[in-house]
Image (cartoon, grey):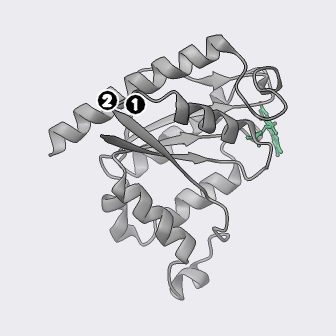
Amino acid sequence: MIKVLGISGSLRRGSYNSALLRAATRLMPPEATLEIASIRGIPLYDYDVEAQGIPPTVTQLKEAIARADGVLLVTPEYNNSIPGVLKNAIDWLARPPADVKRVFAGRPFALIGASAGNWGTALSQAAWLPVLRTLGTQPWFGGRIQVARAATVFDEAGNLKDSGLEEQLKQFLAGYVSFVRRQTASSA
Ligand SMILES: Cc1cc2nc3c(=O)[nH]c(=O)nc-3n(C[C@H](O)[C@H](O)[C@H](O)COP(=O)(O)O)c2cc1C
């Protein structure tokens, strides 16, 4: 069974990105699971805080990533780029540098995202690329999910109501999971 960890980059209760991640959990192929992890409670990065020890919320998330075969990042777009809260979380996860290999290197990552605007996180997803490269991840580029005008594809309760997007997401997840399976097999 392939284990994927999904992380939404929004803390908002009614988040479209968290709704997209929840939709993904039920659209995974049968040979894979998608567990949702949260960045809630991760403090602002501060070296003085790090010097006192890595915060427990960071350690828990690092261990959850280390146990997973792959990571699905679900990113909002703020000012045409990465939202600070998610970047802050990833920066903490990359500390101390000696752990970067264990947590990130060679791990298959995929990116999806939803935004209220017309371009569906295209610029935010592009802004993540140097970060994923720096950390040595294996990003999967075989598909794209950039949900534009998110208010029109989710209902009031945050359920995905667009059947076209649902099918696209299902195909995306199937492609990503077969990539994860290939990567996992080749590194075994
Ligand atoms: C500070 C800030 C900047 C934003 N910048 C963009 C943007 O550049 N492009 C865009 O499509 N939406 C932008 N938005 C709107 C977000 O797409 C919208 O708030 C969305 O709901 C955020 O994702 P969430 O629902 O998962 O929290 C911005 C929102 C905030 C709060």
What residue is shown at x 61% (from left), y 54% (from top)?
Answer: 87
Q: Is residue 141 above or below residue 127?
A: above
Q: Quick check: 113 left or right of 159?
A: left
- Marks 2 and 1 in Cβ contact (< 8 Å): yes
- Quick one: label 2 or label 1, which is nearer the N terminus? 1
Rendered image: mark on residue 81: none
Badge 1 local density, few (<14 within 10 Å), some, or many (20+)?
Answer: some
Q: Mark 1 points at which residue?
A: 140
Q: Nearer the viewer, mark 2 or mark 1?
A: 2
Quadrant field for ligand 1: top right
What residue is shown at x 65% (from left), y 33% (from top)?
Answer: 20
The image quarter containing residue 147 is top right
What residue is shown at x 64% (from left), y 27% (from top)?
Answer: 122
Rendered image: mark on residue 179: 2
**Looking at the picture, how far across and down is residue 71, in whole percent?**
44, 44
**Looking at the picture, how far across and down is residue 37, in whole percent?**
55, 54
Task: Report the Cα–Cα distance between label 2 and label 1.
Answer: 7 Å
**Looking at the picture, how far across and down is residue 160, in whole percent?**
70, 25
What residue is shown at x 67% (from left), y 30% (from top)?
Answer: 121
Q: Which amino acid does label 2 sit on?
A: Phe
Q: In this view, does 133 lie above or below 99?
A: above
Question: Which one is nearer the viewer's eye here, 68 or 137?
Answer: 68
**Looking at the picture, how far across and down is residue 63, in whole percent?**
41, 64
